[in-house]
């Protein structure tokens, strides 16, 4: 990072305002521009979307124009309003089975109405901000649902590949398959085989020429090649038939049993939402893998994505299009083709509109058998061997299998319900399957607990513990990730009794970093997972959970005298060791991502250097969330002051102009030593470094002494003393200093930055937020925000 240093004026009485180093030059009206990468990516996505949209419409039994309508609306509406800029939406293979069933039951016009209602439901879910809740569904269920849909698609399209007509369900299609094989049409099979061969071999073309040719999508090459071969050979096959747009059927009033329609809307909403949200998460991973792209694009806003999908389904259903969801194939092609904004998605929708208006004569040359082969290949790919290996490794293969079989044999909604029930049963089985063993080795008794330790296992735990003789040396190994209050009390009571009878108890965890829930105790020593932050000693026997025991290591009251640096060096080394052992495995993945992407904090947090203020704890934030500046007294020197402190100003400028933070918080705290020093300082005292720094707090003293200005105060009570009054006043004053910085003033004027004042009472562990300096600087307690707002 380079910056131009402004030159001072020669005349000391003359002031010259200069732009901050990172200020952008003045610019004229902003023009709408489309990056060349977005144009090329949109063409690649369009070439994939066109044949797939026709094929999915064919597979559902809907009018073929419905696939084109959905592709165009997905690109334009979902692309513009959605929260995942690079995700491409349109008719998805995962919706094929659901849509085909709806068309068969209720007809096309009612299916369109169901799509509109599903879009309205998605809008409601997006307004309620429940998008993250959809990700709570087990991946085994989602993968099983997609695999079941893939099997259903492949079996149905196989009949068209053979020259016949598919039945309504998988069992019916399987029963009719022998007769279809006996009466297959060779010309349809030949076109289908050619399509599949091109689809399989095109991405594997070798050499330099192969690298250039592979830039053309395999789906387009397969359909175009099969169409050209059929035309040259003069094969008489059923082809794409696009009726006049004047005869296109639009949505009508829903007709049918109310309960059936409600179930249909819920099913469509579930499948569309889950597939779109999981697709947005997958796109984020693809974006993170492209160096330099992630900071420009940003992570997906899942609630906004749900709103965008809902709006797209409303428009698509109203115009007679298929249901819309995020499509993995098109989205991955969009990212890999180099797209940098949502313009590529929208432009692909424009290209689909142009194609539907100008390319109808060309599209009507495509054989239906070629489209069926293309969709059948997509269905087969939905049964992913990688997903099967993953769920097997995580011991969830039963959930996957039950969901897949349920979708294939009963339907999507029924299969998902069976999968959820199976997942709940597996979770309960794991929760109750706890193995407790006892053995004696070299004079010590070992009690090994493998699994979750809940109240259901308390009887077995108690029986096993009573097998240990009085006064024996005992080691209890907890190999699990959870222990409830009943099990904790049982283990603690037994430990107290056993140690009182002369025995010893050592409680360990087999895996370092295992966390065990610890209820409140009434003992004098209250050690918690933040024990390494506290300089205290624990006396007497007590029960130490494995996570805490690993964090503490040896007895804190007996430092190793041989450690480098004495006791302080021992504390530092043990703290680092505890981090490497317990915390590093948990945060390594997130820190690796931050190392790749760079820091993108949302706010600058300016607070005191007091050791009792742990910013990550009081804000519940993690690595990369806060850009923190700490100094004595949380002071913000005014810009341009003689001998001002450039480090704070540089941090503010960097946070606002480079990192583009959205808010700045100035946080004071109770018992601030800097404020006490300000109150007790004498004018004209020795100008030590501390005294010179604290002069930036003198305006706060003047503000507090000025009776014409309202004083900062806490909601519900007055400040306890002059120090607390000055702490509150200082927060308000430092916010005024912040507004004097050019970069902050400019960002506030543009509406891209907010300033917040905060006061943390250390003794009460209570945070207060400033609610308006014009009203006197009232600090209110922080309450749970209204998530429905």
Image (tube, rainbow, N blue to C red):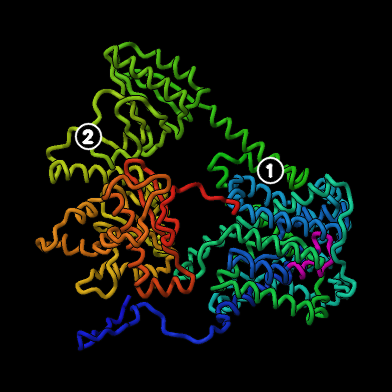
Q: CA distance from mark 2 to mark 1?
A: 52 Å
Residues 221 and 465: in front is 465
**Magenta span contains residue 68:** yes
Residue 560 badge = none
Residue on which the image places disc 2? 556
State whether the magenta stretch is mostly helix, strand or loop: helix
Residue on which the image places disc 1? 403
Disc 1 is placed on an element classified as helix
Residue 48 position in % (x across, y down):
68, 71
Q: Quadrant of residue 336?
A: bottom right
**Magenta span contains residue 767:** no
Which residue is drawn at the image coordinates 48% and 30% (left, top)?
Answer: 452
Residues drawn in magenta:
58-70
90 left or right of 570 in image: right
Residues 631 and 460: in front is 631
Residue 773 position in % (x across, y down):
41, 60
Q: Quadrant of residue 324?
A: bottom right
Q: Residue furthest front?
A: 708
Residue 575 position in % (x across, y down):
26, 44
Q: How many marks?
A: 2
Inspect this view and state whether residue 329 appears. yes
Disc 2 is placed on an element classified as loop
């Amino acid at each position: 990072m380079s910056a131009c240093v402004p030159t001072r004026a020669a005349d000391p009485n003359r002031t010259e305002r200069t732009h901050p180093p990172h200020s952008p030059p003045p610019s004229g009206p902003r023009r709408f521009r489309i990056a060349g990468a977005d144009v090329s990516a949109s063409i690649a996505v369009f070439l994939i979307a066109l044949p797939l949209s026709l094929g999915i419409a064919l597979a559902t039994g809907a009018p073929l124009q419905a696939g084109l309508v959905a592709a165009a609306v997905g690109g334009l509406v979902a692309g513009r309003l959605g929260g995942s800029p690079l995700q491409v939406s349109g008719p998805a293979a995962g919706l094929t089975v659901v849509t085909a069933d709806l068309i068969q039951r209720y007809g096309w016009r009612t299916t369109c109405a169901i799509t509109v209602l599903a879009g309205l439901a998605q809008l409601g879910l997006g307004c309620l901000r429940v998008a993250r809740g959809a990700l709570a569904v087990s991946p085994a269920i989602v993968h099983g649902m997609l695999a079941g849909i893939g099997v259903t698609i492949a079996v149905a399209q196989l009949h068209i590949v053979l020259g016949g007509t598919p039945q309504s369900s998988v069992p019916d299609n399987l029963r009719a398959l022998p007769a279809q094989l006996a009466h297959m049409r060779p010309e349809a099979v030949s076109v289908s085989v050619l399509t599949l061969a091109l689809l399989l071999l095109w991405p594997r073309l070798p050499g330099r020429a192969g690298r250039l040719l592979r830039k053309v999508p395999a789906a387009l090459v397969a359909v175009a090649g099969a169409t050209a071969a059929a035309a040259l050979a003069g094969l008489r096959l059923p082809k794409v038939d696009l009726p006049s747009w004047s005869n296109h059927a639009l949505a009508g009033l829903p007709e049918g049993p109310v309960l059936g329609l409600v179930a249909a809307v819920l099913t469509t909403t579930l499948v569309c939402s889950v597939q779109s949200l999981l697709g947005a998460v997958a796109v984020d991973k693809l974006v993170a893998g492209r160096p330099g792209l992630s900071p420009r694009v940003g992570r997906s806003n899942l609630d906004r994505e749900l709103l965008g999908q809902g709006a797209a389904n409303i428009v698509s259903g109203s115009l007679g299009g298929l249901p819309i969801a995020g499509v993995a194939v098109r989205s991955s092609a969009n990212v890999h083709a180099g797209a940098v904004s949502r313009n590529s998605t929208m432009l692909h929708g424009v290209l689909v509109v142009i194609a539907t208006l100008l390319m109808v004569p060309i599209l009507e040359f495509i054989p239906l058998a070629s489209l069926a082969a293309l969709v059948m290949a997509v269905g087969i790919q939905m049964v992913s061997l990688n997903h099967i290996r993953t769920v097997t490794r995580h011991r969830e293969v039963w959930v996957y299998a039950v969901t897949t079989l349920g979708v294939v044999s009963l339907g999507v909604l029924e299969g998902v319900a069976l999968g959820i029930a199976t997942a709940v049963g597996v979770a309960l089985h794991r929760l109750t399957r706890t193995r407790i063993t006892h053995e004696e080795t070299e004079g010590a008794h070992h009690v090994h607990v493998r699994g979750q330790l809940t109240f259901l296992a308390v009887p077995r735990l108690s029986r096993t513990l009573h097998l240990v003789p009085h006064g024996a040396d005992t080691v209890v190994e907890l190999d699990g990730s959870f222990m409830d209050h009943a099990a904790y009390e049982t283990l603690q009571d037994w430990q107290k009794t056993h140690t009182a009878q002369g025995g010893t108890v050592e409680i360990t965890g087999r895996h370092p970093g295992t966390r065990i829930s610890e209820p409140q105790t009434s003992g004098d020593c209250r050690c918690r997972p933040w024990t390494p932050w506290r300089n205290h000693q624990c006396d007497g026997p007590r029960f130490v959970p494995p996570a805490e025991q690993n964090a503490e290591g040896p007895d804190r009251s007996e430092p190793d005298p041989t450690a480098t640096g004495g006791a302080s060096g021992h504390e530092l080394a043990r703290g680092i060791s505890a981090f490497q052992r317990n915390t590093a495995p948990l945060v390594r993945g997130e820190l690796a991502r931050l190392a790749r992407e760079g820091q993108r904090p949302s706010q600058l947090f300016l607070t005191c250097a007091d050791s009792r203020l742990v910013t990550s704890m009081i804000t519940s934030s993690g690595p990369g969330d806060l850009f923190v500046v700490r100094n004595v007294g949380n002071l913000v020197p005014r810009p341009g002051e003689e001998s001002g402190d450039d480090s704070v100003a540089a941090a503010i400028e960097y946070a606002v102009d480079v990192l583009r933070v959205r808010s700045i918080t100035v946080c004071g705290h109770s018992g601030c030593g800097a404020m006490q020093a300000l109150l007790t300082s004498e004018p004209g005292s020795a100008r030590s470094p501390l005294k010179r720094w604290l002069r930036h707090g003198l305006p706060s003293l003047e503000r507090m002494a000025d009776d014409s200005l309202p004083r900062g105060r806490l909601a519900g009570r007055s400040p306890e003393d002059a120090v607390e009054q000055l702490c509150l006043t200082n927060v308000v004053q430092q916010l005024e200093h912040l507004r004097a910085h050019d970069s902050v003033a400019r960002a506030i004027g543009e509406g891209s930055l907010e300033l917040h004042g905060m006061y943390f009472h250390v003794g009460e562990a209570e945070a207060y937020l400033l609610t308006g300096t014009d009203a006197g600087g009232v600090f209110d307690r922080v309450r749970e925000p209204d998530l429905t707002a």
